[in-house]
Image: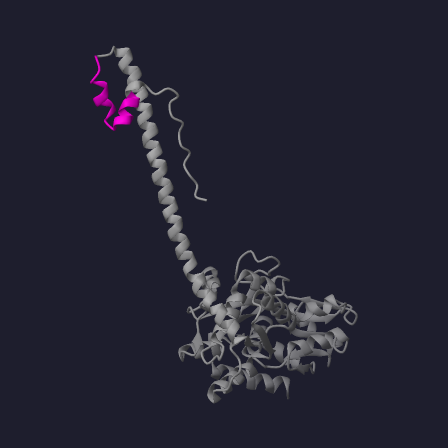
Amino acid sequence: MPTMLAEPSPPARPSRIAGHALATGRSTADVIWQHSAPSVAQRRHVDLEETAMMIHRNATHLTRLVTMTVASFLAVAAALAQAQPAAWKDVVVAAQKEGRVAVFSAQGPSVMERIKADFEKTYPGIRLEQTRMSSGPMMSKLDQERASAADGGDVTITTEMGWLEDRLKEGALKAPAGPSGAAWPAAFMVKGAYPILALEPFGIAYNTNLVKTPITGYRDLLRPEFSGKVGMIDLVATSLIAFYDWLEKKEGPDFLAKLAAQKPKIYGSNPIGAQMVASGELPAVSFMSATMVLPLVTKGAPVKLVYPDSAFGIQYAGGIVAWSRRPNAAQVYLDYVMSRAGQTAWNGLGEAASPLPNIPGSGDVRGIVPYDPARYTPEVIKAYRARWEGLIKK
């Protein structure tokens, strides 16, 4: 209800003259001077009573005016507020008719499970089909689907910002159109076309049963005890190239060569590397995140994750491809992961950090150093890959 101004109480005993004035609609002064001339004291008494009645009448009028104004304002505001939800309801209805949304995602399996459960509870009638793959192969698959006009992914959750930037230049991305966009921080919305949905830090995971002296930094991986027993993740995405580049700058230009001398085991994905450490097949592996490690720890695996000094991080972005066969369901999904509910499902266990403030349990975006995708052009990527493979895979 609108907040109303308190109406002042009228004088307890209005004068006969004042009452006549109010009844006839004439001014108090006109009525006063129709009567025989009163004494100064009487005039002062009448003036005070009339003043009180004028205040009462004006205040009552003002109260009604303010009440009408507030009510009118609220009615207009309500109409404006209902305009977008009404249109959005049409999108949701259309999405339910489409029946499903296909998402290609680089998220961790546990995050995908939580999001699927909450999304399908929030939007019954829209089945969430998620396919997990590394960002590099994912981009290739989407490009192939586009070229062949094949039915495939509707939304990508990826760390490949360069791919999204290229598709944006081609007009091949659809901007989010749902209500969650209104509260999304501008710093995490790229050119109004695709949002940065989470920032995830990476560190070193090690098996506490196998490693007696705790690992605190990347140079600990050069200890003799780890010869032939260090795990590394292959260059399956630009984020991995950025990570190793960052690592060399942080630890020195000789670090990668020294790490290569340890004869590391190379794995094609983070989950495989995490499983190797949890099972005891490897004592330690780098480029690990809480998304990969936490589910194993909750099941009793003797694994610890450390973030040496500053934490290198990746950014997950969400994009709706323009060739989607289910554009409405794609919009509903992206709006969901931008909502507080979606962000809590994704980041609420502290595995990653939400761009939205005050998400319970979320990490802090300020403690993560994300890489700049603009620095990793195709030429830079090609040159770095050749050098890395020459050192690590020789």
Q: Using the image, determine if residue 242 lies above or below residue 185.
A: below
Residue 189 part of the magenta segment: no
Q: Could you tell me residue 140's position as x and y percent?
A: 52, 85
Q: Quadrant of the C terminus?
A: bottom right
Camera-side residue of 345 and 178: 178
Tell whether 351 sits left or right of 155: right
Q: How many marks?
A: 0
Camera-side residue of 238 and 253: 238
Q: Residue at x 63, y 62 (%)?
A: 350
Is residue 385 visible to the viewer in this orientation of the structure?
yes
User: Residue 34 is drawn in which quadrant?
Assistant: top left
Camera-side residue of 321 and 382: 321
Judging from the image, the colouring scheme is one colour
Q: Could you tell me residue 109's position as x and y percent?
A: 64, 73
Q: Main secondary structure of the magenta part?
A: helix
Camera-side residue of 299 and 365: 299
Is residue 383 visible to the viewer in this orientation of the structure?
no
Q: Using the image, determine if residue 72 lies above or below residue 367.
A: above
**Residue stretch in magenta:** 18-36
Q: Using the image, determine if residue 1 lies above or below residue 114.
A: above
Q: Could you tell me residue 317's position as x and y percent?
A: 51, 71
Tell whether 347 sits left or right of 72: right
Tell whether 123 sits left or right of 70: right
Tell whether 212 sits left or right of 186: right
Q: Could you tell me residue 370's position as x and y percent?
A: 53, 69
Residue 28 part of the magenta segment: yes
